[in-house]
Amino acid sequence: MTVVDDRPETVAPAPGRRPNRLLALLRNSWRQLTSMRTALILLFLLAIAAIPGSVLPQRGISPEKVNQYFVDHPDWAPRLDRIGAFEVFGSVWFSAIYLLLFTSLIGCILPRLRDHVRALRSRPPAAPKRMARLPQHTVLPAPAGGTAAIAQVLRKRRWRVEVRGDEVSAEKGYLKETGNLLFHTSLIAVLLGVALGSWYGWSGNRLLVAGADNAFCNTRQQYAEAKLGPRVDSAELPRFCLRLDDFQARFLPSGQPEFFNATVTVDGPDEPTRRADFSVNSPLRLADASVYLLGQGYAPVIRYTDRFGRSQTSTTPFLTTGDMGLTSEGLAAFPDANVDPATGQRAPDQQVAFTGIYLPTAPQKAPFVRSEYPTERNPTLNLVAYRGNLGLDAGIPGSVYQLDQRQVRAGKVKEVGTKLLRKGETWTLDDGTTVEFLGTERYVTLSVRHDPGSTMLLVSCGVLLVGLMGSLFGKRRRVWFRVTSADPTHESPTSGSSLMEVGGLPRTDYPGFADEFAQLVTAVSGADGAAERADTDADSSDRAGVREGTE
Amino acid sequence: MSALSDNLVTFAILTYLIAMISHAVEYALGNARTRVAVASPARELVGAGVGGGGGVIPEPPAPVPPTADGAARRARIAGLVAVGATALAAVLHLAALVTRGLAADRMPWGNMYEFVLTVTFIGVAAWLVVLWKRPLLRKLGLFLTLVMVLLVATAELVLYVPIVPLVPALNSYWFVIHVSTIVFASGIFLLGVVPAVGFLMRNGYEQGKRSFPYTLAKRLPGAVGLERLTFALHAFAFPIFTFAVIAGAIWAEAAWGRPWGWDPKETWAFISWVVYAGYLHARATPSVKRNVATWIAVLGFLTMLMNLFGVNIFFTGLHSYGGLD
Ligand code: HEM
């Protein structure tokens, strides 16, 4: 549309004597890069490049699924991995597209900004000689006040007015270009906000079991997964500790969750000690971090009494398997079991572990594999006991939630029985040792995050919206009035017999311009019988639209 | 109340079907409108509206004089019946939504079924507004009612789920803001695709193409008017959609700890946004033809559909609350 036409078609060629081929090439590429066409193509590429990010599993979102993909497609996965298909939004090609797009954007904004500032400071141009050629045109008696009266009406309607002799030029709708520039500039601000967040932001995820013994502090080591931006030093993380005091959940009869609330105690050098509640949708806001509630579950409390009569208690979170009833799986390991208290001698093949399924509401009859409801109406632990060398000392990192299957396969760990335990029940194993299911504690899964770019993001998104609306709904247009005395001697333009010729030009696609023009003319001529001619050219703006449309 | 809502949906579909058939009858009754118009005094407007005459959205033809021939009158009656049926269907549709909302005791946007039902309602309501302002666009109603029948029937037959309350992640006022604006923008985009497709066919027809889909456009309003309506609807919906995406990011920050995480649903919202931005750009670029730009708008709608159906069905993500297993 016309805004585009306003821009100088080409950058004036430098008045060089010998054309430098390299310079010419550079200049040409820059011109290409900052053209609307290129912007369009890059926008398209950006959309297309995002598609694999939704089709293929992404490391940043679901690393387990990426691993599964490697298992399922052993031939394809490494190849895809090499081109960054599992990290699309951080990949070289995705970044290249948006960086090019934003370069193009800057190259596009700067000259337009200059032109726009110039336009804002310049005066509305003089009337064309032959106003009859304008899309809107009419001639009618001039108001008594002449040009001064016309200018006054226009000013009242917030037109920018310039009076030159017996001509009045006026322009309106600078907001459109202002909004457009604001919109495009805030796109850059959005990108900077994102960049700020990824450079200086950090986040960590972990599971937190209720109780004072399980409190954790905000250090990198305390998180199961931590992500620190490249400009964040792990020693500089804000110092505070969190303890889960209470967790409440309410569920509907169908088992669907209805309400969660976690109560924690916060303390530490960087936070005043206090109690605080938070929930899904309303995170705990600390000075330099926010704590989000992501999930919840049960940690069965299991007491094992070994052959020397020594008891150990473990509270291990069992991970939920994703069903409505919170069926969970986990591992309770007792690597220090059966150490001879007299000699302190460890018997590495006498370590004990239990894997199991925890059912908060076990069904009344077998099979006891799926919980029927998420609260503890019939808490039941379905345990499998193992004895042998758990492999925990071998220095091979293993999951704390799963038994090391390599040890099982190697025959170093043997299954020694299975048993269904209700809360409070005790099970005596074949070697006379006992295991007791004491109850459960609640746990929550948390994400602790700090994003220093979020304020900038929010503000620039607001500006973006305002600019967008100005850009889409603003209409730039010009009108001109020429007062001519009917009296050829031209002595008094304000005499009752003088006429005014009015022309209007919409500078953007604006079907409603004819109406506005008519209204304006009526207002200016003081409605004294002049309205009759106002709608003569009513549909010519539409013709102008056609012309624009076929450009 | 819930059963009442289900019944109302069925009735709405049937009424849309009646509207569609009436529109088809109006269409089939040949050059009726041209003849009606010729019989009316506004001769020159006919050329503008029916021919390639451009941006003029013509005035409605004068009432049929008693001398107009039977086919013309029957066509006109069929058209009016179609509009009446569409309005009635919209009322039933709205009643279905209200009863569903009352039965669930919340806004009826909790799952894919309710979502599609609401989006289509916005689409039809906006259509009635457009029709009110531009009665001569009535013939587009055939496409609109076709879209309504298809989408509402899909909702009822494929997506239907019984009423359940919201999961806690959805229970926030940002949810109401985010989803209501998404629904609203989607409804306008849905309506926008009707004149877009109409324009593409009509434009081909006006350029002399006489093969199958183009011939359907013989009795559509002029291409330039259709194109303008397409743009107006998209320009209206785009900032709302932008706001909805931003509101979603604010909500996601509170619920999941990050404003944007490239979850499949977010990724597709991004894709739709970029494609629609591409449409607005293309339309503002003089060297890009209007039909190319309009294709981009249609593509934008396909990405919205992908987000609505495809993502809920094929992918799992934080947003998968479609209610289907
Ligand atoms: C970062 C990617 C970009 C996005 C998301 C974007 C988005 C938009 C949108 C939504 C509009 C419509 C608003 C309106 O019609 O006034 C628009 C208009 C415009 N854009 Fe962009 N844009 C981008 C990059 C660019 C670039 C690189 C250029 C320069 C080549 C550019 C130049 C323009 C111009 C001149 C208009 C005004 C069109 C008119 O006259 O209405 N944009 N842009």
Image: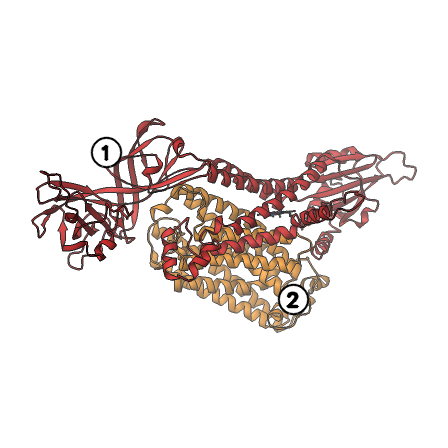
Chain colours: A red, B orange
- What is the three-letter code of the residue carrying label 2? Gly
In the displayed structure image, the side of residue A225 where residue A366 appears, left or right: left
Is residue A514 at all visible to an observer of this figure? no
* Marks 1/2: CA–CA distance: 74 Å
Mark 1, residue position: A212
Q: Residue at x 29, y 38 (%)?
A: A262
SS type, badge 2: helix
Give left or right: position of A48 versus B12.
right
- Residue ranking furthest to the right: A489
Chain holding disc 1? A
Compared with B127, A30 (above or below) is: above
Give the camera-side residue of A138 and A369.
Answer: A369
Indicate the quadrant containing the C terminus of chain A: top left, top right, bottom left or bottom right: bottom right
Residue occupying image coordinates x 62% and y 46%: A104
Quarter of the image where one finds residue B129: bottom right
Q: Residue at x 11, y 44 (%)?
A: A306
Q: Which residue is mark 2?
A: B204
Q: Residue furthest left?
A: A432
List x then y, in percent, for residue B23: 55, 67
Q: Which is nearer the eye, A361 or A340?
A: A340
Q: Position of residue A549 (x, y in %)?
A: 69, 56
* Foreground label between 1 and 2: 1
Which amino acid, mark 1?
A: Ala
In the image, taking residue B149 as reference, residue B219 lies left or right, namely right
Q: Residue at position x 71%, y 44% from top?
A: A477
Percent across and percent down for residue A474 are 64, 43
Judged from the image, the secondary structure of the residue bearing numbered disc 1 is: helix
* Quarter of the image where one finds residue A451: top left
Instruction: List x then y, in percent, for residue A464.
Output: 56, 41
